[in-house]
Amino acid sequence: MNTQTYSPGETTTAVATVAVIGLGYIGLPTAAILAGKGLHVIGVDVNPYTVEAVNEGRVPFVEPDLGIHVAGAVSQGHLVAQSTTPQADAYIVAVPTPFREDKTADLVYVEQAARKIAPQIQPGNLVILESTSPPGTTQRMADVILALRPDLAAEANDGEATVLFAHCPERVLPGRIMIELVMNDRIIGGLTPEAATAAAALYSTFCQGGIHLTDAATAEMAKLVENAYRDVNIAFANELSVISSNLGIDVWNLIELANHHPRVNILQPGPGVGGHCIAVDPWFIVSADPENSRLIRTAREVNDAKPDHVVAAVESAMAGHESPTIAALGLAFKANVDDMRESPAVEIVRRLADSNPGARIVVGSPFSESDLPEDLAAFGNVSLTGTDAAVDAADVVVLLVDHDAFREITPEQLAGKKIVDTRGFWRA
């Protein structure tokens, strides 16, 4: 299927009820926006706390403006949450797709969702996979459903009733999800052209960006390519930071100077790469074609190794302190969110706690509602406190996340302390 641009009005959707399977960082915003357009949306999640929170109009994680959308949709009766999969006109699957120890995709949650959809699905229904996935996952999801429902097919054949299967990857940034879900272009790939068009009609109810139609495998690969591109560019910056440190060069000054070239735009280095996309998606490409993905693999290895360099820098700064106190500022994978998925900051604190049992590690967080991840809480030398308290107690201050709140830390608070600044926050 060649890429086409969908124009609203080419077809109308008969969808009145949408079941969104998985009410996480993508599923819940999508459910809230669809409900805000007057569709009846049933959110499905295995976590009882999430179901309860949504039905009370609350959001179980931090995302700007999402709470307003959820509260409004629930109060108007357009959004409800439950633990069981209902009958619906359309299903949007937005469940996790983590990777295994060998870096291949673990599709168990997609398959579980498919098995729960199968008994409920009716002829003409639309099933959309939003979860970021290796090429072929949408077909695999369809195969699971159709194996349980031999009365249905993905393509009309000998009078069989059809179900429409499509892939529509999210392309949003945490902290801006409610804006970017609406404004960003969408790529929609169908197992059939009819499925792509039907999915586009549903997304056109709220998407103001362009909607581009293709086949499912290409849509799956497009999302992976977007994040692998970003990962490769971040790896270049992170590798420069390691080289510059060894050569006694200020990497941020170096990048600033190099970026004065009209065709150079080097990104900023950091403590590694985290999040549900960039730290994961490139491995799906590597596993799909290991022999020809050498650059993508190397970029992943460079970024995965960056926490090692940060740990070494902190341990060097600790030298001379018998029982040092380390202030670790931030645990999220990026600024101004509480999302700790694949966060290099969490990994750095974990390694410091494990290899330095005599050190006291005080995590400073601007999110008062945040808790330590279970694996960090298990260490007796790690605790969570406010930012000022962490800095005041510290011999070594490690800036791991560039939260805006950390800009309120004054030079006087840092006086006399060793500083490991992974974000270039406190450059002289």
Image (cartoon, grey):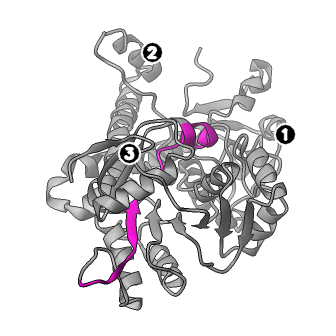
Label 2 secondary element: helix
Q: Nearer the viewer, residue 169 or 1?
A: 1
Whether residue 165 appears in magenta in the rendering, the answer is: yes
Give percent across and percent down for residue 409. Answer: 76, 26
Give the mark nearest the N terminus, 3 or 2: 3
Q: Split into 4 quadrants, where in the image is the C terminus?
A: top right
Q: Which mark is residue 227?
A: 3
Residue at 71 percent across and 50 percent down: it is 361
Q: Mark 2 and mark 1 in contact (Cβ < 8 Å)?
A: no
* Image quadrant where residue 425 sits: top right
Magenta span: 158-182
Query: Compared to 217, does 161 lie above or below?
Result: below
Q: From what the image shows, is residue 4 above or below residue 218?
A: above
**Real-space CA distance between mark 3 and mark 2, rounded to the nearest whole angstrom:** 26 Å
Q: Amino acid at mark 3?
A: Asn
Residue at image mark 2? 253
- Residue 336 occupies which quadrant of the picture? top right
63 vs 317, left or right, is right
Give x and y (percent) for residue 231: 37, 42
**What is the C-alpha distance between the residues marked 1 and 2?**
31 Å
Is 224 on the left-hand or right-hand side of 408? left
Q: Tell me residue 244's x, y (percent).
A: 38, 26
Judge the density around disc 3: few (<14), some (14-19), many (≥20) Cα neighbours within 10 Å: some
Which label sits on residue 72?
none
Which amino acid type is marked by label 1? Answer: Ala
Question: Of callouts 1 and 3, which one flags the residue occurring earlier in the amino acid sequence?
Answer: 3
Label at residue 389: 1
Dot 3 lies on which element?
A: helix
First of labels 1, 2 by sequence position: 2
Residue 16 x/y as whole percent: 61, 62
Which secondary structure lies at badge 1? helix
